[in-house]
Image (cartoon, helix red, strand yellow):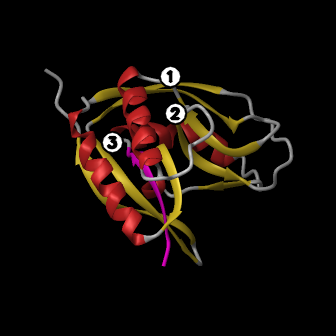
Amino acid sequence: MKQRVFFAVIPDNATRELLDAAIAPLQADGNPRLRWLERENWHLTLRFVGDVEPSVVAELQDCLDAMTGHGCFQQSLTQLEVFPTAQRPLVVAATGPVHSGARGIVEDLEARCRSLGLPEEGRPWRPHLTLARIRGRRRFEMAPTAIDMSFTVRRLLLMESVASAQGRRYMPIAESSLTAPT
């Protein structure tokens, strides 16, 4: 049976609390097109893989283990916005700049996934942490909201997206620690 998997980082609890406060006014609006994710599902995807056989999941765990040579880095979140665009709305996300440490990890993961015969991601990586899904594919306007938060990324995870009657749950399969800064 295939598993739907991706590589991700999870923000720390302090960042989650700040995000809770930042999205409270948006949640209070009660927009019916927004389906807010549970805090436990918040993550920043580094590389979406998709539906793969369990044998490939084992190889992806090896890819994750190979990431330990990368250093910890700070991930900033600077804006709440419609992602990827108002014309093609998928989610409301907290976004931020690409840190060079994250870029190196994403490039390494991409190369390792290609070596396993997986299709290329096909678009440049842009850090975003999904907070709500937008129902319907028609235009969705929301003024971007400035935020100012960051968290230290110390570990990477291989996650599985599991469907249930209550929606998707994102479950860790494996994790790998990054090298502490010197």
166 lies above or below 147: below
Q: Earlier in the sequence, mark 1 or mark 3?
A: 3
- Left or right position of 133 against 131: right
* In contact (CB < 8 Å): disc 1 and disc 2: yes
Identify the residue at image location x=37%, y=69%. Answer: 55
Disc 2 target residue: 127
Mark 3 residue element: loop
The alpha-carbon separation of the residues under discs 3 and 2 comes to: 16 Å
Instruction: Tell me the CA gap for discs 1 and 3.
Output: 18 Å
Q: Amino acid at mark 1?
A: Pro
Quadrant in which the C terminus appears:
top left
Determine the residue located farthest toward the right in the rendered image: 138
Q: Describe the element under mark 2 as helix, strand or loop.
A: loop
Amino acid type for the residue under numbered disc 3 = Asp
Q: Report the front residue among 171 and 63.
A: 63
Q: Which mark is residue 97?
A: 1
Depth order, front residue of 142/118 = 118
- Residue 103 location, quadrant: top left
State the extent of the magenta-drawn residues as a range.
1-10
- Image coordinates for residue 40, horizontal then vertical, percent: 43, 57
Proximity of marks 3 and 2: CB atoms separated by less than 8 Å: no
Q: Residue at x 78, y 41 (%)?
A: 88
x, y percentage for residue 176? 24, 48
Reading the image, the residue beneath label 3 is 12
Res. 112 mark: none
Q: Quadrant of residue 167?
A: bottom right
Rendering quarter of residue 178: top left
SS for tag 1?
loop
